[in-house]
Image (spheres, rainbow, N blue to C red):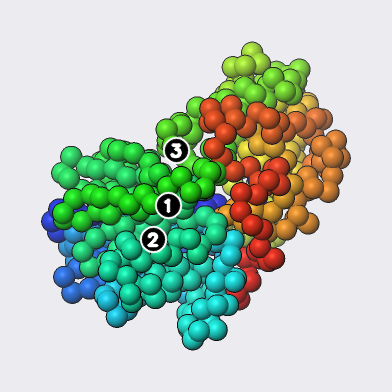
Amino acid sequence: MSLREECGVFGIFAPEETDAAALCYYGLYALQHRGQESCGIVAQTAHGFVSHKDLGLVGDVFSQEVLQRFPRAAAAIGHVRYGTTGGSSRRNCQPIAVNHRNGSLALAHNGNLANAGALRDALEANGAIFHSTSDTETIAHLITRERLTAPSTEEAVSRVMPQLTGAYSLVLLTADRMLCVRDPHGFRPLCIGKTPAGVWIAASESCAIRAVGGRKIRDLLPGEILTVSKAGVSARREHCGTAPQRTCIFEYIYFARPDSEIDGVSVHDARLRAGAALAEAHPAQADLVIGVPDSGVDAALGYSRAAGIPYGIGLIKNKYIGRTFIAPDGRLDKVKIKLSAIESAVRGKRLVLIDDSIVRGTTSGRIVQLLREAGAKEIHLRISAPPFLHPCYYGTDIDSEEHLIASRHTPQEVAALIGVDSLGYLPVAALPSLTGGSGFCSACFSGDYPTAVPGSARKDQFE
């Protein structure tokens, strides 16, 4: 698939000074799958914020030398980015840090505001100056303005939330506390955990909490504002229940790591169920079921078990090449660099190939070509998501129907275009079986948007 990732946020609040930046570093490593465009860490010290952020992967941006420049601190927040609003430049790296009349604020944001354009226009009309082209800076402007009259950062955030339309899971840092905020629809995940040493952790996914030796305590409720300080943990819930929960279903299908749990549902188990539903809806006569690594593997296993067709490994992913890999001369096929077929496993076989989605169809076609060149006899492509038919305004990088192959072609036509013998998508009606409920957003498949649709949602609308 060629869909872009989401962002990831991470936060640390310890009872005393510790290597907070190093803990953030490990947490961001565990969230690297959510964004490979840029990353950053902001630590709160007795003398104010210390930060470092840049374009690139976590391991490249944060060398040992850079990490050693961070002093010991009790709190830090971090971010890995794939930008859904704003271009790829250093000015859009997060977390962002600002000084204002009542103190300082650092902010990391996962999600996308559907009304970012209108909010920014209103702020600029009132004299606001923007340094970046991301919607995260808009949130920071709104919070610091409300803080002029609000008695606390929590109250300022609470006043801002009704002004925001769309997806936002936030981790904020002030001089003495860490705030965690999830939008009333709960579009994006956010959870809280704790280590045996009493260090509190906020993270987009539970896998990052485990990566630093912590244990997940719970997911934030949609609409919740949770504060961690030396006085303990407190929560404000005046916005909880003000909107129906609509967690992005694609978190379970693709974004999240399979060893994570979101809102009490195992991502791995959700993908197994997707594969089983595919086997029921679109059976195939085949010799082997294989998955496109990484997010197609769990669904392939579920398909195999339900269909009674052996599961095997037919594609190998080069683990040392990130999604930001660029062929130096522009001539090499990047799919062939990232993936290779195991010829002895697929030669002469009728394959069921499981992938998580088809967006434009380009990547899928190249993967099919790899398997054909390796000698596959038949390829029956099964997709563990319904067809993408509509733009997403909440953080998935789909801003126009013209880029979606399924919105312009029937499944039979798509199958012919990418060179497979048959194609089957997960039925929309099967989506509730993934999570065991209906509290999810599937607007990119159904067109049923939980919020007002903006006039423009181009990623570069502020460039």
Q: Circle 2 is placed at which residue position?
A: 158
- Residue drawn at x 20%, y 56% as measured from the top left: 229
* Labels 2, 3: front one: 2
| Mark 3: secondary structure | strand
In the displayed structure image, the side of residue 425 where residue 219 appears, left or right = left
Q: Residue at x 24, y 43 (%)?
A: 194
Q: Are marks 2 and 1 in contact (CB under 8 Å)?
A: yes
The reply, left or right, for residue 460 in relation to residue 258 is right
SS class of the residue under badge 2?
helix
For label 2, the crowd category at 10 Å Cα-Cα, with few meaning under 14, some 14 to 19 and many 20 or more, is many
User: Mark 1 sits on what residue?
Assistant: 239
Quadrant in which the N terminus is drawn: top right
What's under tag 2, amino acid-wise? Ser
Q: Locate the C terminus and report the quarter of the image it occupies.
A: bottom right
Q: Is residue 37 above or below residue 90?
A: above
Residue at 38%, 51% (x, y): give it.
Answer: 238
Residue 25 seen by the camera: no
